[in-house]
Image (tube, grey):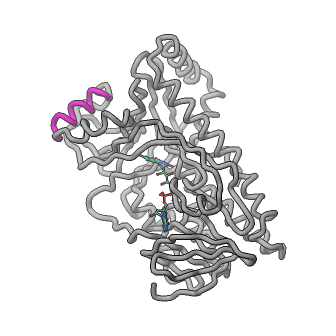
């Protein structure tokens, strides 16, 4: 650590995509801010990151407001105009087109490293902001004037407001004694970059298989980034396949929707679970992003919800400060919790419901979901409501 203060106004634990969004949103506030991140910053390389995010329009607004969207657009991003969702066990499908809402796109696929790099660039050279990396917090202590964290090198830092942006296994959350009801799906998501025989047509493709959802997301170079969810006990076998048989298995699972899969990058797998805290805030403490909620990636919403958490928390802090209120006090922070918890919980519950409904081979359920998809496709009001929700356009910041 080159420059370290002993006391900060705000300490953000976790310099992932969500923690960095908050740091950018508070960048010009005059508050002294420290961001503590255990891992060295990601580097954008020639090879496309296997981790990408479908960024919805609400998140684009957040990135625009903190001035980092332009930097992302300069890199490899792919706006998609259409989304096609279908059930592999029947004829039910639904097709979304941004033109139906008079919009130029439904969202944009951006590599996670590109998002992180643009956000890091946004906080570079900010006098009141210290990027404390690579450092890991090992313990948290609450005292009268705020919180104190101890780093792995024994150094202690204190703050008025401690923000846990440290992901699904949040130490801040645990130290604060906030219960996180996490359930595992006993599934993992395999991710990689693949080339296909037919063009992706700037469309996000999602197929519900009885074994779990499979998504093909369009990339700027014409390839697709895939997320293939399956039971944890099958993952090892699929990961161990040579490229050729892997491509054959993948194109078959995808119903040859884009023809043959002609090549694949190296693959990685991530455990899938869901959970939510009841309490987002305490006196001098707030949780944002995956530290507060963890949802299935099938609708690509986890990070999007986190970006909105960050924007909302920053706004609540700045408004309370402007009104000369104790912005770190529980009564001020509650406004953030009230604004975000209901919508986030609804999204988490809906994704779990989807996962159960589509991951079931019961023929009656299959009939029901195929009829439901067909109906949703035919009822314009319902369809536009679904589209707006996916784009985050019904979110109130
Ligand atoms: C396969 C897959 C696909 C997905 N696709 C999408 C998508 O398309 N769209 C979307 O919106 N979401 C998607 N998600 C969800 C999304 O990736 C997460 O919601 C998002 O990454 C959460 O960001 P975060 O910053 O809250 O947490 P994290 O990304 O987990 O970041 C937490 C950070 O805190 C740091 N940290 C942790 N503990 C400490 C400590 N003690 N000290 C210091 N630092 C610490 C970590 O190193 C890390 O950098 C997907 C998830 C998966 C698994």
Question: In which quarter of the view is residue 256 placed?
Answer: top left
Question: Taking 373 as reference, is 319 left or right?
Answer: right
Residue 366 image point, x, y percent? 48, 16
Between 280 and 54, the one lying in front of the other is 280
Residue at 45% x, 80% y is: 153
* Residue shown at the point (51%, 71%) measured from the top left: 137
Q: Is 370 or 294 nearer to us in this picture? A: 294
Q: Quadrant of the N terminus?
A: bottom left
Residue in the picture at 27% in, 33% down: 250
- Does the rendering let one see residue 24? no
Q: Is residue 102 left or right of residue 76?
A: right
Residue 282 is situated, as x and y percent measured from the top left of the image, at 72, 62
Instruction: Give residue 218's position: percent from left, percent from top.
Output: 37, 44
**Could you say which quadrant of the image residue 347 lies in?**
top right
Q: Is residue 337 visible?
A: yes
Which is more toward the observer, 137 or 35? 137
Residue 53 covered by magenta stretch = no
The quadrant where residue 380 appears: top right
Q: Main secondary structure of the magenta part?
A: helix
Depicted 100 relative to depicted 370: above or below = below
| Range of magenta residues | 243-253
User: Is residue 270 placed above or below 95 in the rendered structure?
Assistant: below
């Amino acid at each position: 650590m080159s420059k370290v203060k002993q006391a900060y106004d705000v300490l953000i634990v976790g310099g992932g995509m969500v923690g960095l969004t908050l740091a950018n949103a508070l960048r010009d506030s005059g508050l002294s801010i420290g961001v503590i991140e255990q891992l060295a910053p990601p580097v954008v390389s020639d090879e496309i990151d296997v981790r990408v995010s479908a960024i919805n329009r609400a998140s684009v607004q957040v990135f625009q407001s903190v001035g980092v969207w332009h930097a992302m657009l300069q890199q490899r991003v792919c706006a998609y105009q259409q989304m096609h969702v279908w059930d592999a066990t029947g004829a039910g499908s639904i097709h979304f087109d941004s033109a139906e809402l008079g919009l130029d796109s439904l969202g944009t696929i951006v590599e996670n490293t590109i998002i992180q790099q643009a956000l890091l660039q946004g906080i570079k050279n900010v006098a009141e902001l210290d990027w404390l990396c690579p450092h890991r917090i090992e313990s948290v202590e609450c005292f009268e004037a705020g919180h104190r964290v101890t780093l792995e090198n024994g150094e202690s830092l204190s703050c008025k407001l401690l923000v846990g942006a440290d992901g699904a296994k949040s130490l801040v959350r645990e130290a604060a004694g906030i219960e996180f009801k996490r359930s595992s799906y006993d599934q993992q998501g395999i991710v990689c970059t693949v080339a296909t025989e037919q063009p992706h047509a700037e469309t996000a493709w999602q197929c519900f298989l009885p074994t779990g959802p499979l998504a093909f997301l369009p990339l700027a170079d014409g390839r697709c980034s895939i997320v293939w969810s399956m039971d944890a006990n099958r993952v090892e076998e699929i990961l161990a396949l040579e490229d050729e048989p892997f491509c054959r298995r993948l194109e078959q699972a995808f119903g040859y929707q884009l023809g043959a899969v002609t090549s694949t990058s190296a693959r990685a797998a991530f455990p899938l679970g869901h959970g939510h805290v009841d309490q987002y805030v305490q006196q001098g403490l707030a949780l944002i992003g995956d530290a507060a909620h963890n949802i299935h990636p099938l609708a690509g919403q986890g990070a999007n919800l986190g970006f909105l958490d960050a924007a909302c928390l920053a706004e609540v802090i700045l408004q309370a400060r402007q009104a000369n209120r104790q912005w770190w006090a529980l009564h001020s922070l509650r406004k953030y919790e009230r604004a975000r918890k209901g919508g986030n919980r609804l999204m988490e519950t809906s994704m779990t419901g989807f996962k159960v409904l589509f991951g079931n081979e019961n023929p009656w359920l299959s009939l029901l979901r195929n009829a439901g998809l067909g109906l949703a496709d035919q009822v314009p009001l319902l369809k536009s409501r679904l589209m707006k929700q996916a784009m985050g356009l019904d979110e109130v910041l």
